[in-house]
Amino acid sequence: MSSVRINESPNHFMVLDAIGRGVKSFDKIAKVTRLDKAEVELIINDLIEQRLVLRTEKKGFLRTKVELTISHTGLQLLNSKKQDLEKQVQQIQQWQSNGQTQQLQGYMDNNRMWIPMMLFSGIMNAMFFMSMMSMLGMAMTPAESGLAGGEGSGTAADSGESAGAEDSGAAADSGGGADFGGDFGGGDFSF
């Protein structure tokens, strides 16, 4: 049995969310989540072992194709976690609008690992996140920057696919009306 406690692993939820959106291959999951391929493979194995993801093999002419789908239990767990994170984002937005920087700082100190998942799933808007970070005077991690459409991610910039935000670095630096392609607003991706 896996020693990973999935409820405490944002990367597991990002992979689960990608599979739930119909991303079926290891390479595509690594690309959209911006996680290392080896890490994605370990996470997928954990999810399969916990029966949150189903693995099917389709025989082709030259090779066997592996496809991944989310199980009913996996979907329930993902939806439950998303609802929990949505409540947290509402609280964060309230703190920011009231100027309660101590509460925001405390949240970030204790829960920052969930920010990439919130951005990936469209639970937190990238512009809100960047304004919150600016308010707190904090720098973004490479994972946060990549998912928020910044230029510090390396993987997004190097692959030429920055989630529809080709020039997001300049737009974000200018501080005015950056358009990140809408990928994070509603959470739907097109592949």
Image (cartoon, rainbow, N blue to C red):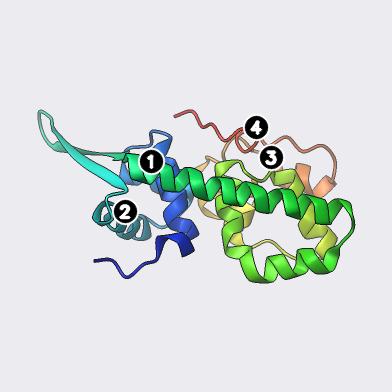
Give the CA separation, mark 1 to mark 2.
11 Å
Residue 136 falls in which quadrant of the image?
A: bottom right
Neighbours of disc 1 within 10 Å: few (<14), some (14-19), many (20+): many
Q: Rounded to the nearest whole Å, what is the CA distance between mark 4 and mark 3? A: 14 Å
Q: Earlier in the sequence, mark 1 or mark 2?
A: 1
Q: Which residue has dot 2 on it?
A: 47
Q: Residues within 10 Å of mark 4 (few under 14, many from 20)?
A: some
Res. 167 mark: 3
Task: Name the residue type under label 3.
Answer: Asp
161 relative to 105, above or below: above
Residue under pointer 1: 19
- Amino acid type indicated by mark 1: Ile
Separation (CA) of disc 1 from disc 3: 28 Å
The amino acid type of the residue labelled 4 equals Gly
Q: Secondary structure at mark 2?
A: helix
4 or 1: tag closer to the N-terminus: 1
Q: Which mark is residue 182?
A: 4
- Mark 1 or 3 closer to N-term? 1
Q: Nearer the viewer, residue 166 or 21?
A: 21
Q: Position of residue 144 (x, y in %)?
A: 62, 56
Q: Residue 63, relative to residue 132: is it above or below? A: above
- Which amino acid type corresponds to the residue marked 2 in the rendered image? Leu
Q: Viewer-nearest of labels 1 and 3? A: 1
